[in-house]
Amino acid sequence: MFALTADHTFHLFNQPTDMRKSFDALSGLIRNHLDSNPLNGDVFIFINKCRDKIKLLHWQGSGFMLYYKRLEQGTFEIPRYDASIGSIVLTYAQIVMIVDGLSIKNL
């Protein structure tokens, strides 16, 4: 069940991510590169270099949920960001549009 809502905080990791990484390795990226706790209830978003795969990692109190989507055509559009920061915070509307493949340029 897709249990993400506008009440969550969404963090887009600013580096391309190896999509072979799973729960533990992605949690390590959150701890080591974002200096954040993956158990805090926030949603952390990772996109690969080709921008055709996306993973969302979310702690739901008793365990991690990992959402994964691979595009057969096209790429995920991500907003512009300052590369010197570890992540950018997205709104729920932005993350839904990214996952659905819609343009976010006007948001």
Image (tube, grey):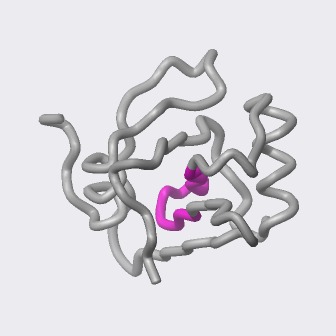
Q: In this orientation, which residue lies closer to the viewer: 24 or 21?
A: 24
Task: Tell me which residue sits at (63%, 61%) in the image.
Answer: 57
Q: Quadrant of the C terminus?
A: top left
**Is 93 displayed left or right of 44 in the figure?**
left
Task: Tell me which residue sits at (63%, 16%) in the image.
Answer: 84
Whether residue 51 is in magenta: the answer is yes
Position of residue 29 measured from the top left corner of the image (x, y, whole percent): 80, 45
- Count of numbered badges drawn on the protein: 0
The answer to whether residue 33 is above or below residue 49 is: above
Task: Tell me which residue sits at (50%, 30%) in the image.
Answer: 88
Whether residue 46 is in magenta: the answer is yes
Q: In this orientation, which residue lies closer to the viewer: 107 or 5?
A: 5
Position of residue 91 measured from the top left corner of the image (x, y, whole percent): 34, 41
Q: What main secondary structure does the magenta stretch of the protein show?
A: strand
**Is 55 displayed left or right of 64 in the figure?**
left
Which quadrant holds residue 34? Answer: top right
**Is 56 displayed left or right of 94 in the figure?**
right
Residue range of the region highlighted in magenta in the rendering = 43-55
Q: In this orientation, which residue lies closer to the viewer: 57 or 83?
A: 57
Task: Tell me which residue sits at (42%, 75%) in the image.
Answer: 71
The answer to whether residue 45 is above or below residue 2 is: above
Which quadrant holds residue 13? Answer: top right
